[in-house]
Image (cartoon, coloured by chain):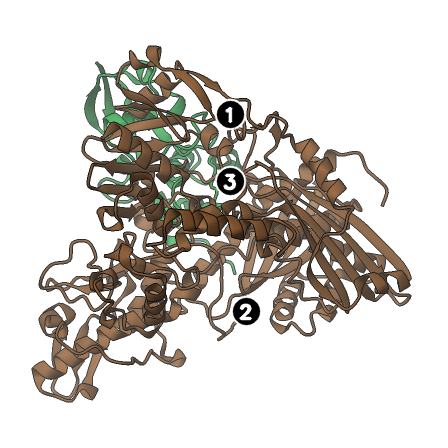
Chain colours: A brown, B green
């Protein structure tokens, strides 16, 4: 069924999603693939499409196909449906979508929540789906009352006919609506008449998250469930040589101890039993890549940065202009590996039998989870069910499916439902990290202080090259595995070599909006065994620190105000410029400050959204204190201003954690940090006051979850320079501050 | 067999004395509102009240709880949501929500000890509870809102 759809069919489905006619598309032999019935659908239900279901009991069920990981999809997406279906958002019954290709994210090509795409990609399709349901309900009412449809209006969960005072709840119209023709086109509510979109509807998941009833992956209960902890190789690239579980097997509650491709799984009735038994399993690992060491990597990156690399952007003649410049500044910026450290450790629950595989997982991609379960079990797609749960944080970590793979593998081996649960140390040491990066920048100023050349060389690992195998799932479902692997290897070779630069390594550098006539951005992709992956704002998370810090250095060297020079050079980028101006105005840029404080400004456009921050900091007894953040954002049409503000507040806290104190380091091929005392997120007493300002816009919606992150660290570094005259070019800033001061 | 009183109800569990209370609550008693975050009392996601005082249940051996009273998030608002829980909803505090059971339990204990907490009081107690989504600005506001409500005052004014 689902699995037999070909790539071309899927594209047609994608196009159809945009046209609201999902249910009418019939693919040869697999019509069910595009018309999934949400869980619990009854025979009398009206199910116009994959998202909406109305029951005769008058329940309006909305199937949410973008995961809820804190960013607010449950609320924002309910608003999109509520608007067009004329119901209150809080009246919707919200169901989390199982994996199904009908729910592929049109922006990403599979069922996945990432890239700050949720509102952007669902804004029209969900509204069309809801409007389609509304039109069919109106048609049903008009037929029942034998009146023209024009007089039938949708209002608060009912169709009303004002002329005759008749009224029917949606539930009463189910049977008839199911037989109405699907309208070829539907009209969405005009912008001026929106009642729900654009308002700060209170979070629909708040109640369940303050009374303990919200169910995350770790909370899943299944009859007969046991729990596994997995012993994974402590050194990168190491593999299992042998293990002795004899002693562990005699411990209370132990079900089995099995070798799996990822290591050794210790399975017990309870987590604490498995964790205890695991301590007495004797494991011998191969040596692995014990040479890997952060300091050695940093030295090699710096050496690589001294040699030319592949151009990712080249405007004018940066090198020629630099030769003619009156002054040339050079600066090197270094950023460490970072873990996502979501508060819910990775986990997944799987129940595999000979003929069926069912998975419950807090994953950002139920679509990839299904592909992984298929690969591990060899079962056909229609025998695999993936349920999503709430996510206790995502930040990109849950795009990978390692926890799903392990749970499916262990359940397959022990033939019982199994939950694999990572400890915090497992979570910290077995991840896909934000890559370490070195940026070397050179900037030329002419005699008048104008920036005439900009040269930026980035050295980092390619996430795309390393994670491409996972994205093999993007290939047509029927593709033989050998072809998939060959394709994946070919793509990885191109991306990882010096052919095509991985755009995710240079986003934020190659996308600089400043009007600089001669600008060159180069990328040197390095490949080694440290696992890397997307981390909230991906490439922007390291490039923007370098770009916005260096811009400040150039402005100050030219004797110009960093805000005014940014404003001047953003003349052809009106949205970035408006955001910058609003932010500076609300922050009182240029105004007086208490003694010892400095202000720093930085901006970036990422995922279609412009965001600027002004940080106010002081340095007291060798510690950076952040007093205040003022931020402005333009994310196009806003569905829920309260949620946008919350995401910017969140991005500031996430960005400050990395700016001030977090780093993952490697020694002897092992990740050094294990728990929160060694990799500490920002704590409440360190959180500054925050003001978030939204730029009004009627442009299409763009991303919100990530765009607030990139400019946080440079705003702080620029503010530190303003406060105490020290330029910090290494993150985390706490470490940079402790380094000996180097002139220049 | 170890007996304890959880959310007002006598419970009996057959586990070794050194099993952390967190896992007894979650796995033996099915109370999953209390969360596992670190296992080292570093994040506060597992905060419950033991005889009225906040503790990190991930490091409390269940043997130490024998005969004692434990209050979890499920018991806190069982009959009606508490002022803290209502304030959390009013300020839209939760994002992913995973840490919020612990935040609510810690904030509840704070208000009991300091009915009119200063910013320093809030810092001192709630800095022990990590929130990776960074809901701290709203946590601070919600604590003040709940304190105002309990004191019979209007909620503090919203800021931009």
Image quarter in which the N terminus of chain A is found: bottom left
User: SS for tag 2?
Assistant: loop
Q: Are marks 1 and 3 on the same chain?
A: yes
**Few, some or many residues within 10 Å of mark 1 (<14, 14–19, 20+):** many
Front residue of this view, candidates A733 and A29: A29
Q: Position of residue A587 (x, y in %)?
A: 65, 60
Q: Which residue is mark 2?
A: A695
Residue A44: image quadrant is bottom left
A562 relative position to B75: left or right: right
A292 relative position to A286: left or right: right
* Mark 1 or 2: the one toward you: 1
Against B140, is A152 above or below?
below
Against B106, is A38 above or below?
below
Name the residue rendered at 37%, 80% in the picture.
A190
Front residue of this view, candidates B32 and A546: A546
Q: CA distance from mark 2 to mark 3?
A: 35 Å
Does label 1 or label 2 sit earlier along the sequence? 1
Against A485, is B59 above or below?
above
Q: Are marks 2 and 3 on the same chain?
A: yes
Q: Which residue is mark 1?
A: A234
**Few, some or many residues within 10 Å of mark 3 (<14, 14–19, 20+):** many
Does label 1 or label 3 sit earlier along the sequence? 1
Q: Which residue is mark 3?
A: A432
Regarding residue B152, the answer to whether it shows in the image is no
Q: Are marks 1 and 2 on the same chain?
A: yes
């Amino acid at each position: 069924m689902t699995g037999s759809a070909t790539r071309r069919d899927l594209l047609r489905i994608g196009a159809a999603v945009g046209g609201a006619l999902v249910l009418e598309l019939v693919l040869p032999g697999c019509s069910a693939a595009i018309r999934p019935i949400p869980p619990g659908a009854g025979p009398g239900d009206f199910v116009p499409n994959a998202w909406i279901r109305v029951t005769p009991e008058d329940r309006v069920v909305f199937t949410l196909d973008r995961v809820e990981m804190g960013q607010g999809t449950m609320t924002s997406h309910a608003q999109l449906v509520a608007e067009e279906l004329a119901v209150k958002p809080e009246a919707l019954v919200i169901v989390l979508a199982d994996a199904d290709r009908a729910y592929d994210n049109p922006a990403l090509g599979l069922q996945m929540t990432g890239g700050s795409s949720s509102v952007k990609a669902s804004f029209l399709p969900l509204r069309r789906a809801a409007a389609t349901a509304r039109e069919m309900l109106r048609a049903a009412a008009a037929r029942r009352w034998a009146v023209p449809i024009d007089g039938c209006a949708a209002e608060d969960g009912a169709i009303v006919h004002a002329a005759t005072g008749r009224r029917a709840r949606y539930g009463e119209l189910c049977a008839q609506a199911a037989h109405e023709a699907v309208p070829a086109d539907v009209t969405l509510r005009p912008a001026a008449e929106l009642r729900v979109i654009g308002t700060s509807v209170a979070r629909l998941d708040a109640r369940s998250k303050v009374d303990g009833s919200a169910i995350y992956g770790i909370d899943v209960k299944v009859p007969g469930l046991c729990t596994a902890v997995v012993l994974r190789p402590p050194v990168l690239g190491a593999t299992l040589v042998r293990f002795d579980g004899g002693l562990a097997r005699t411990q209370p509650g132990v079900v089995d101890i099995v070798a799996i491709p990822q290591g050794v799984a210790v399975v017990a009735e309870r987590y604490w039993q498995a964790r205890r038994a695991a301590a007495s399993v004797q494991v011998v690992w191969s040596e692995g890549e014990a040479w890997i060491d952060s300091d050695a990597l940093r030295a090699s990156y710096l050496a690589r940065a001294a040699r030319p690399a592949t151009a990712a952007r080249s405007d004018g003649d940066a090198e020629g202009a630099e030769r003619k410049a009156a002054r040339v500044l050079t600066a090197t910026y270094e950023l460490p590996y970072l873990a996502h450290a979501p508060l819910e450790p990775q986990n997944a629950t799987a129940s595999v039998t000979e003929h069926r595989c069912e998975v419950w997982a807090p994953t950002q991609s139920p679509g990839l989870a299904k592909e992984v379960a298929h690969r591990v079990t060899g079962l056909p797609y229609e025998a695999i069910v993936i349920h999503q749960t709430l996510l206790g944080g995502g930040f990109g970590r849950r795009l990978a499916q390692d926890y799903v793979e392990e749970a499916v593998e262990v359940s397959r081996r022990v033939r019982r439902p199994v939950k694999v649960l990572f400890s915090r140390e497992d979570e910290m040491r077995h991840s896909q990290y934000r890559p370490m990066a070195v940026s070397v920048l050179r900037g030329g100023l002419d005699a008048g202080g104008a920036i005439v050349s900009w040269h930026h060389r980035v050295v980092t690992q390619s996430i795309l090259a390393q994670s491409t195998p996972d994205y093999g799932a993007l290939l047509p479902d029927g593709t033989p595995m050998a072809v998939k692997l060959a394709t994946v290897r070919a793509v990885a070779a191109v991306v990882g070599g010096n052919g095509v630069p991985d755009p995710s390594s240079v986003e934020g550098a190659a996308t600089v909006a400043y009007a600089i006539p001669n600008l060159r951005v180069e990328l040197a992709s390095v490949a080694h065994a440290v696992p890397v992956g997307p981390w909230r704002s991906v490439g922007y998370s390291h490039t923007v620190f370098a770009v916005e810090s260096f811009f400040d250095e150039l402005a100050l060297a030219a004797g110009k105000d960093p805000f005014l020079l940014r404003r001047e050079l953003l003349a052809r980028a009106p949205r970035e410029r408006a955001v910058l101006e609003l932010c500076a105005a609300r922050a009182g840029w240029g105004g007086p400050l208490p003694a010892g404080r400095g202000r720093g400004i930085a901006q970036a456009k990422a995922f279609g959204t412009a965001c600027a921050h002004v940080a106010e900091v002081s340095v007291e007894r060798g510690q950076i204190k952040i007093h205040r953040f003022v931020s402005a954002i333009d994310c196009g049409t806003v569905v829920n201003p309260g949620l946008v503000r919350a995401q910017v507040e969140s991005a500031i806290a996430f960005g400050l954690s990395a700016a001030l104190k977090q780093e993952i380091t490697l020694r002897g091929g092992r990740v050094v940090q294990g728990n929160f005392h060694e990799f500490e997120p920002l704590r409440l007493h360190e959180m500054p006051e925050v003001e978030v300002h939204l730029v009004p816009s009627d442009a299409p919606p763009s991303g919100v979850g990530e765009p607030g992150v990139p400019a946080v660290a440079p705003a702080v570094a620029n503010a530190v320079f303003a406060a105490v005259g020290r330029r910090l070019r290494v993150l985390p800033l706490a470490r940079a501050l402790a380094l000996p001061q180097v002139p220049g | 067999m170890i007996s304890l009183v959880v959310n007002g109800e006598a419970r009996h569990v057959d586990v070794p004395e050194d099993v952390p209370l967190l896992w007894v609550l979650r796995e033996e008693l099915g109370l999953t509102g209390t969360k596992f975050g670190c296992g080292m009392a570093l994040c506060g996601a597992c905060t419950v009240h033991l005889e009225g005082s906040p503790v990190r249940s991930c490091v409390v051996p269940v043997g130490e709880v024998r005969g004692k009273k434990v209050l979890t998030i499920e018991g806190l608002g069982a009959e009606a949501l508490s002022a803290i829980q209502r304030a959390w909803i009013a300020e839209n505090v939760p994002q992913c929500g995973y840490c919020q059971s612990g935040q609510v339990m810690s904030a509840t204990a704070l208000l009991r000890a300091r009915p009119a907490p200063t910013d320093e009081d809030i810092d001192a107690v709630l800095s022990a509870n990590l929130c990776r989504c960074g809901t701290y600005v709203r946590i601070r506001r919600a604590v003040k809102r709940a304190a105002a409500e309990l004191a019979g005052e209007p909620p503090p004014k919203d800021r931009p």
